[in-house]
Image (cartoon, rainbow, N blue to C red):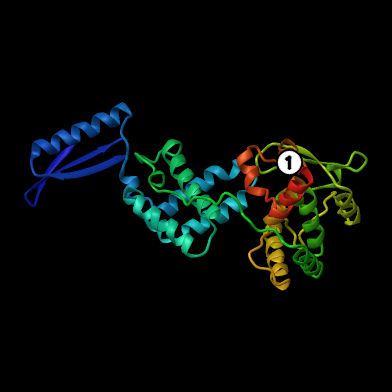
Amino acid sequence: MATMVKRNGKWQAQVRMKGIRRSRSFTKKQLASQWANKVEAEIINGTYEDNSQLITMSVRELIDLYYDHAKNTTEHAKRLRDECNKINRYPIGSIRLGYLNGKHVASFRDQLLSEGLVKSTVRKYMGLLQRALDIGRKELGIPMTHNPVMLVSKPREDDTRDRILEEHEWERLLESCDNSTVHFLKALVLLARETMCRRSELLRITRYDINFDRGTLHLPKTKNGSPRTIGLSPRAMEVLKSLPVTVDGSYFKSPFKSNDNLGNLVSKAFARAVKQAGIKNFRLHDVRHMSASDYAMKGWTVSELSAQGGWKTLSQLKRYTQIKGEHLAQKMRQDG
């Protein structure tokens, strides 16, 4: 039974039932009693939602709950942890869920953009925040009525990333990679150009995935979750045969005990190689773009490119292929 206490001219209703404690003040005793009866009925019927969580829980705490919920269902738990930590470092992390609104989300978006992050990366962090809030509402019992991220426009991605190295730049890059402290960096970059594979796919290659007789490479774990078997060019097979193989069959191993940070190690080494080669605005992932463009200009069909590179939609593939104007002009002359 709720209790009613008059304090400082107001009536305070206090509900204590099944471990739940709630209180609220009203100007009239009748209003206090009506509120208390409603809360008690909801507790008895099992429909009561404890909105106090929205006042006490911060975005940072929800992000941590989401990570604990999702870490066992992803192959990239460490990457997810790093991405969650990045969100938590921004002011939005300290906002209480009950006060979170579109303005906070827009400010978070603008902070990321002002730091020079590319639009696709900003979209990724906004998407992560949106998923965390959705899972909080749907599966973790957080009584939010809406998701503020859905109220805010995400930066539009450019249709393509137009960064293809000229041949002299490519040669400088390979020379710089050859001098890297990561001894296999040049081989990895060459394989990315020859196969269209992602960094993560290449780093997981083992000798058991390769059939040199058939010239194929099986990729059991891919970004989109669908295994695929791809073709290997003569150059790719030459590179693979030149690499030492570890006891467990791996081609690429971290110099440290664990391979957990191998991806970051490679990306940082590649960034240093790019800088030493005097090249600007070029990422390891751009080698995949170059590879797709290479094969497109050799006459590969859309179906062949998609099968090799693992793109599921035409729009994804279009973002990766860059056909130079010189190539189109040559085709015109040939067809004319």
Q: Which residue is mark 1?
A: 305
Seen in the picture, residue 182 relative to 93 is either above or below; the reply is below
In this view, the residue in front, 44 or 123, is 123
The image shows residue 178 at horizontal and vertical percentages of 82, 67
Q: Is residue 204 visible?
A: no
Q: Residue at x 44, y 40 (%)?
A: 134
Q: Residue furthest front?
A: 336
The image shows residue 41 at horizontal and vertical percentages of 24, 29
- Count of marks placed on residues: 1
The image shows residue 129 at horizontal and vertical percentages of 47, 49
- 266 relative to 239 in the view: left or right: left
Q: Secondary structure at mark 1?
A: helix
In this view, the residue in front, 290 or 90, is 290
Seen in the picture, residue 190 relative to 336 is either above or below; the reply is below
Crowd rating for badge 1 (residues with CA inside 10 Å; few <14, some 14–19, many 20+) = many
Q: Is residue 263 visible?
A: yes
Q: Amino acid at mark 1?
A: Leu
The image shows residue 165 at horizontal and vertical percentages of 72, 61
Q: Residue furthest top?
A: 45
Q: Residue at x 55, y 43 (%)?
A: 70
The part of the image, by quadrant, that contains residue 106 is: bottom left
Q: Residue furthest right?
A: 213
**Quadrant (top left/top right/bottom left/bottom right) for the C terminus:** top right
In this view, the residue in front, 58 or 241, is 241
**Quadrant (top left/top right/bottom left/bottom right) for the N terminus:** top left
Q: Residue at x 73, y 47 (%)?
A: 332
